[in-house]
Amino acid sequence: MNKTDTNAFVNQLLVYTLVMICFSGSIGLGTVWLRHQISVTANNTKQLEQRITEDERHMAELNTQITEEQTITVLNRRNVAWNLGLVQPREPQVVRVNESAEQRLASRNNAEVFASEAASVTPVRFRLSGSYP
């Protein structure tokens, strides 16, 4: 069997054509796979957004119910119904203190400790003349 140059050229052309068809097919298959993955991701994102919207609506409903339960009329009615005996706070609820809180608490907590020492302590007097009384 004697091969001629035309047969070798046809064989090479056939091989290159098959390689190009396989390469183009793999690119097409990869494109279809990527589009499928994009579609799956978009569907998952849409489902998550729906769940988030549903949860936000549920939170808004709960906040509305909590606000309704915290009104004074509802609290007074529950107080009477459950026999709690609670009274409403007196005004003013907030009292501002101008002095230092640390000093006020320390003097109140340590008043009995320093009260006995205050009676026995005598003040020290300095005289410039140098003589003692």
Image: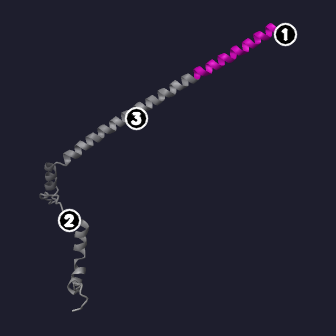
Mark 2 or 1, nearer chain start: 1
Kind of residue at disc 1: Lys
**Does 22 sit left or right of 38 as displayed?**
right
> In screen coordinates, is 78 left or right of 42?
left
Question: Where does the image place residue 45, in percent across and percent down from the top left?
Answer: 42, 32
> What SS does tag 3 mark?
helix
Q: Write down the quadrant of residue 16 in the picture.
A: top right
- Of discs 2 and 1, which sits in the foreground? 2
Q: Amino acid at mark 3?
A: Leu
| Residue stretch in magenta | 5-29
The N terminus: image quadrant: top right
Q: Secondary structure at mark 2?
A: loop
Q: Is residue 116 left or right of residue 22?
A: left
105 or 118, which is in the foreground?
118
Q: Which residue lies under the disc numbered 1?
A: 3
Mark 3 Cα within 10 Å, few/some/many (few <14, many 20+)?
few
Q: Residue furthest right?
A: 1
Q: What amino acid type is highlighted by mark number 2?
A: Glu
Is 38 part of what is drawn in magenta?
no
* Label annotation for residue 99: 2
Give the Cα separation between the discs numbered 3 and 1: 66 Å
Q: How far is mark 2 from mark 1, CA to CA? A: 112 Å
Mark sitting on residue 117: none
Up the image or down, 105 lies above or below 21; here it is below
- Per the model, the C-alpha gap separating discs 3 and 2 is 55 Å
Which mark, residue 48? 3
